[in-house]
Image: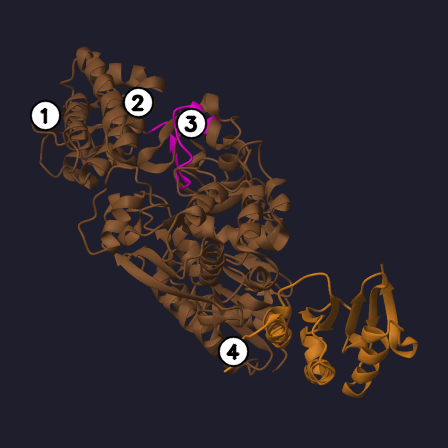
Chain colours: A orange, B brown
Amino acid sequence: MPRIKSLEDLKKIKENAKDLTSARSEGKTRVVIGMGTCGIAAGARKVMDAVLAELEKRGLHDVTVETTGCIGMCQQEPLLDVIRAGQGRITYGKVEPEDVPRIIADHVVNGTIVQDKVIGRAD
Amino acid sequence: MALYRAHVLVCGGTGCVSSGSEGVLTALKERIAAKKLDNEVMVVPTGCHGMCEMGPIVVVYPEGVFYCRVTPEDAQEIVEEHLFKGRRVERLLYKESETLKGVPNYKDIPFYSKQVRVALRNCGYINPDNIEEYIVRDGYAALTKVLTEMQPADVIAEVKTSGLRGRGGGGFPTGLKWEFCARAAGDKKYVICNADEGDPGAFMDRSILEGDPHAILEGLLIGGYAMGADEAYIYCRAEYPLAIKRLQRAIEQAKEYGLLGDNILDSGFSFDVHIKEGAGAFVCGEETALMASIEGQRGMPRPRPPFPANKGLWAKPTNINNVETWANVPTIIRNGGAWYAAMGTEKSKGTKVFALTGKINHTGLVEVPMGLTIREVVFDLGGGILGGKKFKAVQIGGPSGGCLTEEHLDLPISYESLTAAGAIMGSGGLVVMDEETCMVDVAKFFLEFTQAESCGKCVPCREGTKQMLLMLNKITSGEGTLEDLDTLEELALMVKEMSLCGLGQTAPNPVLTTLRYFRDEYEAHIVEKRCPAGACSALLRYIIDPERCRRCGLCAKACPVSCISGDRQTPYVIDQDKCIKCGACYEKCPFDAIDRR
């Protein structure tokens, strides 16, 4: 039982429990995965699993993962968007689960866009 | 800990529970599990979101999409469409009243966009049964700050700076009250949380207790430290079973985490909290009656002085504040008194929670900065009058408050402005009335309540309210005289002046304000034997207009006492002697041939 004895203890509990409400706060980097029928057929589910696994592995609490419907570029599915403050909305196409760690590490964490997978950009 | 990409918040306040949110919660969990999303989507039961009339309410994060009136049958669609495929379920969105366009986001709904939530900051956002969610929201940080960095006098100074005043109705400066208790001689002191919310139409305290119980505990702890008390009582009416359950759970958790009990945070400060269930007597919201009730005596007030700060519970120095006051304390300490004082008006600082009820579109709870006008609260946040009818009056402060009219709509809400207009802030009940409300009937309703709740200890309240009620009954049954109005006013002022406690001192307010602003309605009842709003059934007449009557006979069939006669040749007629004024014929007539006068 975590008895709180000091400010540090309280902070520790707060840090550990962050995930409890992290999805509810705003102003964070967003990863959006296309989950229309086209996306699902192209394997978006596996991409989603890979994203969640990678975020958990890296202990990233300040990233939200959202789903969205078909946006019309079905031939490029699975689609994955990263929306990072100051960089607009970057859309990656034909994302494979293997691409996910690279996108998370380079773009989500470090802000370097993974150019070879980018198919669109909106500000 | 697994990472949950989406959180589905299901309101578990009493309002939403009674409209079926528990079934929604179960259905959502089932559907999520069936779709194998239970490792990535979390379902969280929360406290009240405030928009009770739109319940059961479900909010989906991270997008912050707000769904209303969700049924268990909708769970399938929310899970399939929104959580799995990322498509909002448009038909469940909140609809803007004018354009009927769906408003997807929580924060864009007008009901929420004008609110400033301090006391309600966690209500509807966290799971009240989980102390860790409270801690993530900076919970117990204020307690830690107080115990490690501040002297008791510093805490009191901070509360004084904030300008916080008692949110239970009295409006006494909280910091000053704390100082009296801190200075009182004695080594044993108590702090009490008054959760005996009993006004008809008020539920702000219940929502805070249900939605954020740890905030109350933290407030009590901070107050206890500041005043040198080591024990607290929460006096909560037994009619709030959910609030009591959540409080008990919160107390257990705080004890597990070492935030209640002996030597908290190794500071040497020890503190314990008890819950006392009240039996629901309105008078027990009065502080001296409340303490008598905790002591096991009959809940009756006693004269003050001595004030509780010097001689309170078991004759020890005691401080009593209500739920909303305590709930503000942790945030004031965390953000500083000056931050709080920056909101509101010159003498009424901070925010106030109001319970909107009556003939208003969005029944529910709102927290707004002091100084907002009644118009903004009723029309902008509350969405205006039900059915597009005309606004007539608003009763502020429950049975102790008064009715304010259209001319007060632009009155900025503060303790002073409301008192000057004849009402009181009270605990924040706001009952809205439309053109079909009879003001004499309203005064009678509230007086019936206070009369029944009078404890009977002092004569003015016991006998005075009784006589006032008899006079109101006389007037609404068409037997009043104009002299009655003067007697009524005289008696009301006497009861107000001479009663022992707040109950009697404020009970005449509804009568006095309606007499002041709606005297013509009283006179219509007396002189014309007519109820202008058509609400007092004894004065009503249902009359069939022979010109308009098409002789269908539906009225005669609907009449439960068979007092309508007629046939295909002769128009139907109501026998006024037998008529019980139920209105069944009026409702039934397809040709609007029946007049109600």
- Residue linked to disc 4: A3
SS state under label 3: helix
Image side of residue B88 versus residue B16, left or right: right
Give yes or no for residue B434 being in the magenta stretch: yes
Q: Respond whether the residues carrying marks 2 and 3 are from the same subunit.
A: yes
Disc 4 packing (10 Å; few <14; some 14–19; many ≥20):
some
Q: Nearer the viewer, mark 2 or mark 1?
A: 2
Q: Earlier in the sequence, mark 2 or mark 3?
A: 3
Quadrant assignment, res B522: top left
SS state under label 2: helix
Label 4 amino acid? Arg
Residue range in magenta is B417-436
Residue B362 can be seen in this image: no
Residue depicted at 23% across the width and 17% down the height: B490
Q: Position of residue B257 (x, y in %)?
A: 49, 75
Q: Position of residue B154 (x, y in %)?
A: 58, 51
Image side of residue B106 versus residue A59, left or right: left
The quadrant of the picture occupied by the N terminus of chain B is bottom right
Q: Chain of mark 4?
A: A
Q: Earlier in the sequence, mark 3 or mark 1?
A: 3
Q: CA distance from mark 1 to mark 4?
A: 77 Å
- Kindly check if marks 2 and 1 are in contact, taking CB atoms under 8 A apart as contact: no
Residue depicted at 23% across the width and 40% down the height: B302
Q: Nearer the viewer, mark 3 or mark 4?
A: 4
- Residue linked to disc 2: B512
Disc 1 packing (10 Å; few <14; some 14–19; many ≥20):
some
Q: Nearer the viewer, mark 3 or mark 1?
A: 3
SS state under label 4: loop
